[in-house]
């Protein structure tokens, strides 16, 4: 035991140390336990699930998911939920406007510019034009099925991947489908200018394939139940919540095993001794301060130049008509997309009176939580003023930052083989270091579980 001169209260010896208890980390931990591997999960939040977060109303016990809501109808999803006897619901089967059901409601859908509250007439393509555009998109994306399995790209990298997404949709005559893509793929920031590879992994080929079958969600609007039960399966002694890695020694230990020094929520420290490490957090240089990065790791991770900002939550005391969802649409932008930073829309949850979803996006991750909350309150008041209702200070019930969202590198880096170098990191340090999470695939639980099952876990087991 070689780091920080014995400044720890406990040593945990495990086969695999997993850094990050979000969708990737928890799924991987469960998968590895099923393979008779011992694990420990280090998570900075006080809950498992990462972007999955659920609010429970203290009076009615009604639940609302404010993060991850939907899953594709694929075996890896069914298997994970079934393992813990968590029921799923096909959202296409929900009775519209059924009382007490927040999943699907039939609302009026006005468009307004949230900068001033003015009504906007949005240019909308016909249903036939949109359907044809989506058919063309399926044809294009069918050339790149490997995008569903990570970033193992051909060499040379197809030019489509590093085109701005706006240029990509013009190239293939997909403009009639863009606004629907934008409304579904929230959190992509300035989507017209992001490199296409990020857009078509987030709104992906399987989304188009499975749209007619319907997406799934937890049957009672509580996706967090999956992670609660998964946590029980992993075991409390194998989960360190509100904890972070403050130092890593993966190369020069007496035992030959990587070691991680962890600061825990009680202010103490624990030393983790691992045969393998699985890193699932955003691999920014800031997040990895204290790690003994290899030259290859630093060369890759230092190329992340930006990310989007994305925040979600719930507010009450808004007082607007709860049969109306107001979409933020700017009058003077391409496709009438909102001028970010901004709320994407203002929508009632439906199953709790006068409670409203908050989904706020920005082109970069630099805004503080306090700035975001203040901005949201002002935009809500703008819509209140435009609708001639009482101006209130919205009351926050829950607020979560998903920032940084979609780490990105320059288009030139994509062209020059960034993702080849990223995927080559798997199995580094002689089969001791592995990676999962959104940076190695996309911000989509279904695809991250598929990536774990088909790529990461098999590689880890082959290296044992």
Image (spheres, helix red, strand yellow):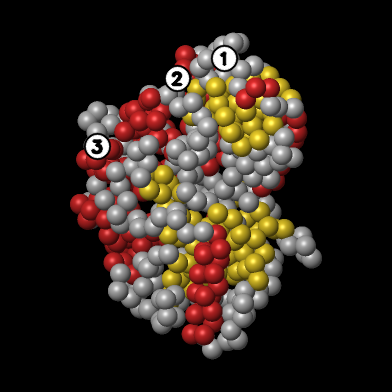
In this rendering, the answer to whether 445 lies above or below 296 is: below
Viewer can see residue 237: yes
State left or right for residue 338 relative to residue 167: right
Say what secondary structure mark 2 lies in: helix
Q: Nearer the viewer, residue 229 or 274?
A: 274
Mark 2 or 1: in front is: 1
Residue holding disc 1: 253
| Quarter the N terminus occupies | top right
Q: Nearer the viewer, residue 44 or 438?
A: 44
Residue 38, image x, y percentages: 67, 21
Q: Quadrant of residue 45?
A: top right
Counting every numbered tag in the picture gives 3
Residue holding disc 3: 415
- Marks 2/1: CA distance? 16 Å
State left or right for residue 286 relative to residue 222: left
Mark 3 or 1: in front is: 1
Residue lying at 52% horizontally and 32% vertically, measured from the top left: 290
Q: Earlier in the sequence, mark 3 or mark 1?
A: 1
Q: Quadrant of residue 84?
A: top right
Mark 2 or 3: in front is: 2
Label 2, residues with CA under 10 Å away: few <14, some 14-19, many ≥20: some
- Marks 2/3: CA distance? 24 Å
Label 1, residues with CA under 10 Å away: few <14, some 14-19, many ≥20: some
Residue holding disc 2: 428
Q: Earlier in the sequence, mark 2 or mark 3?
A: 3
In this rendering, the answer to whether 254 lies above or below 403 is: above
In this rendering, the answer to whether 167 lies above or below 290 is: below
Residue lying at 43% horizontally and 35% vertically, measured from the top left: 440
Residue 375, image x, y percentages: 50, 69
Residue lying at 55% horizontally and 59% vertically, measured from the top left: 369
């Amino acid at each position: 035991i070689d780091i920080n001169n014995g400044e720890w209260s406990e040593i945990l010896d495990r086969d695999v140390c997993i850094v990050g208890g979000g969708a990737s980390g928890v799924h991987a931990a469960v998968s590895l336990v099923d393979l008779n591997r011992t694990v420990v999960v280090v998570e900075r939040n006080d809950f498992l699930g990462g972007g999955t977060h659920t609010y429970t109303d203290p009076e009615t016990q009604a639940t609302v998911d404010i993060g991850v809501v939907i899953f594709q109808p694929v075996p890896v999803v069914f298997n994970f939920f079934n393992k813990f006897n968590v029921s799923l619901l096909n959202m296409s089967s929900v009775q519209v406007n059924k009382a007490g059901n927040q999943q699907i409601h039939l609302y009026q859908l006005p468009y307004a510019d949230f900068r001033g509250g003015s009504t906007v007439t949005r240019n909308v393509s016909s249903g036939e034009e949109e359907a044809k555009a989506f058919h063309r998109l399926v044809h294009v994306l069918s050339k790149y099925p490997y995008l569903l399995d990570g970033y193992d790209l051909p060499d040379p990298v197809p030019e489509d991947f590093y085109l701005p997404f706006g240029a990509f949709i013009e190239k293939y005559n997909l403009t009639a489908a863009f606004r629907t893509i934008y409304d579904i793929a929230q959190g992509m920031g300035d989507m017209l200018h992001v490199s296409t590879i990020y857009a078509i992994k987030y709104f992906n080929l399987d989304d188009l394939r499975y749209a007619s079958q319907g997406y799934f969600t937890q049957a009672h609007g509580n996706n967090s139940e999956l992670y609660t039960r998964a946590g029980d399966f992993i075991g409390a002694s194998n989960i360190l919540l509100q904890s972070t890695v403050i130092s890593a020694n993966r190369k020069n230990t007496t035992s030959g095993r990587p070691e991680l020094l962890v600061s825990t929520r009680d202010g103490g420290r624990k030393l983790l001794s691992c045969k393998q490490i699985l890193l699932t957090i955003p691999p920014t240089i800031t997040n990895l301060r204290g790690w003994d990065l290899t030259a290859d790791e630093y060369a890759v991770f230092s190329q992340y130049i930006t990310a989007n900002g994305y925040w979600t939550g719930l507010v009450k005391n808004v007082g607007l008509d709860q049969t109306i969802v107001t979409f933020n649409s700017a009058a003077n932008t391409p496709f009438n997309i909102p001028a970010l930073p901004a709320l994407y829309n203002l929508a009632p949850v439906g199953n709790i009176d006068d409670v409203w979803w908050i989904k706020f996006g920005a082109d970069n991750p630099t805004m503080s939580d306090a700035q975001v909350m203040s901005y949201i309150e002002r935009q809500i008041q703008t819509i209140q003023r435009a609708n001639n209702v009482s101006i209130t200070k919205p009351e926050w019930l829950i607020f979560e930052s998903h920032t940084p969202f979609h780490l990105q590198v320059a288009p030139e880096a994509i062209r020059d083989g960034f993702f080849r170098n990223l995927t080559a990191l798997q199995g580094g340090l002689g089969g001791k270091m592995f990676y999962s999470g959104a940076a190695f695939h996309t911000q989509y639980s279904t695809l991250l579980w598929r990536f774990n099952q088909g790529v990461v876990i098999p590689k880890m087991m082959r290296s044992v």
